[in-house]
Image (tube, rainbow, N blue to C red):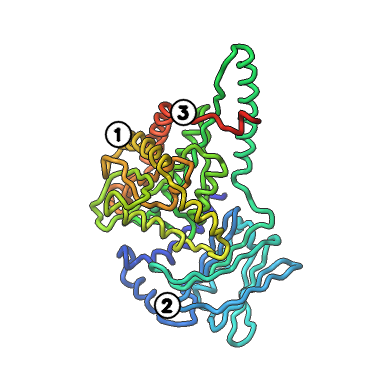
Amino acid sequence: MRDRADRRSASVARFSIERRRACRWLLVPAAQSLASTFAWADAGRIASARLWPAQEYTRLILEAPQAIAHQLTALKDPPRIVLDLAGVELTPELAQLPSRVQPSDPYIAAIRFGRKTADVLRVVIDLRTDVRSELFAVAPVAEYGHRVVLDLYPLTPVDPLAALLEEIKAAEARAASDNERSTAARGGGKASRRIIVALDPGHGGEDPGAVGPRGTYEKHVVLAIAKRLKARLDAGNGMRAMLTRDDDYFVPLADRVARARRAHADLFVSIHADAFREARARGSSVFALSEHGATSAAARWLAQRENAADLIGGVNLDGRDPVLARTLLDLSQTAQISDSLKVGRHVLREIGGHNTLHKAIVEQAGFAVLKAPDIPSILVETAFISNPDEELKLRSDKHQARFAESIAVGVKSYFAQNPPLARAASSTG
Ligand SMILES: [Zn+2]
């Protein structure tokens, strides 16, 4: 059910996104490009309205060529949100919004329109339950216009890590008591514990990542590969993988790092499939963080693109914790980078057995998502989605499984040579 619903939402979203990407990718027939030009020419018109439903939060985005004057009122009994838009007409694009509400949306039941005054369009969002809402504007970036973003969160936040954290705690308690017993019996012993690997499928929701010549979205293929990789790592006894996102919604870069740290991850693997300016560019690459500069112009270019994810996906800067952001940036990361390069080499070697390598060394650049000060972190560019051959590979079940397999083998061989330390928490109880 969920899958079918996701596909529906993807197809609903596709037109808007492809239209915006038309200039860069020259994918869309000329007639469609023209249509979008006309839509953009009118001020006061909503050019695109998108919905990204997910358990963690549902996001509504209205996009226009000019800033939209807006006002939000939350009402109870029944719970609903009223969004008043000044000087906005009910265009066909906006009028379609109610049909985009999915039966599976956890928070939105329906959307209706009315007129507050002759000049103010009223959008009424009927809710399934009381929510905490966040409303903010995002200035134009890349091919995106002015966006108004409304996020609806449950009153009790969904914690995707809760189950994992409980499981880790239970496993460590078991390991500690086993260890006590074996220590008593043999007069020695070493605590063994599960290795936690954070898997980070890039992009998601409003941020599609790169788009291939056949219209394949990076966000979809990297999620598919990450899920396969998680299943592969979870299958053994020694490891437990967690995903920083498990569905098609946007997660800010700092949140991805924060989730891995909360799970006490021993390794962070960000998974991508990016595009380059030239369609010929091909091959897999592995990156670690660089504190100063990048190892190549291409690595720098790619890091800049990846770091723009927050701007593309839309982050409410009011809600950010600047202290946390500073801590992540200021700590010296020498040890982390040295470990990241090590694990990167293991993964690169395995991927090289499956796909051409873009570069035979682990490259480095200032990727924001690799900045956890205490977790070795790598970013794997599985292949270039901009290369027609590699796009086909990324779409195929067989190759997705092979990418996952080679990353899994690389990760395991790294930990076989570099076992993680016993956790302080487990030895002190
Ligand atoms: Zn990417």
- Mark closest to the chain's N terminus, 3 or 2: 2
Residue type indicated by callout 3: Pro
Verify CB contact (< 8 Å) between mark 3 and mark 1: no
**Circle 3 or circle 1, nearest the eye:** 3
Graded by Cα atoms within 10 Å as few (under 14), some (14 to 19) or many (20 or more), the crowding at tag 1 reads few
- Kindly state the secondary structure of the residue where label 3 is placed: loop
**Residue 181 image position (x, y, % from top left):** 64, 17
**Circle 2 or circle 1, nearest the eye:** 1
Q: CA distance from mark 2 to mark 1?
A: 49 Å
- Does 117 sit left or right of 224 as displayed? right
- Kindly state the secondary structure of the residue where label 1 is placed: loop
Q: Would you name the residue on which mark 2 appears? A: 39
Q: Quadrant of residue 212?
A: bottom left
Name the residue at 61% across, 25% down. Answer: 175
Depth order, front residue of 79/265 = 265
Q: Would you name the residue on which mark 3 appears? A: 419
Give the farthest residue toward the bottom: 118
Q: Would you name the residue on which mark 1 appears? A: 353
Residue 89 appears in the figure: yes
Name the residue at 53% across, 27% down. Answer: 237
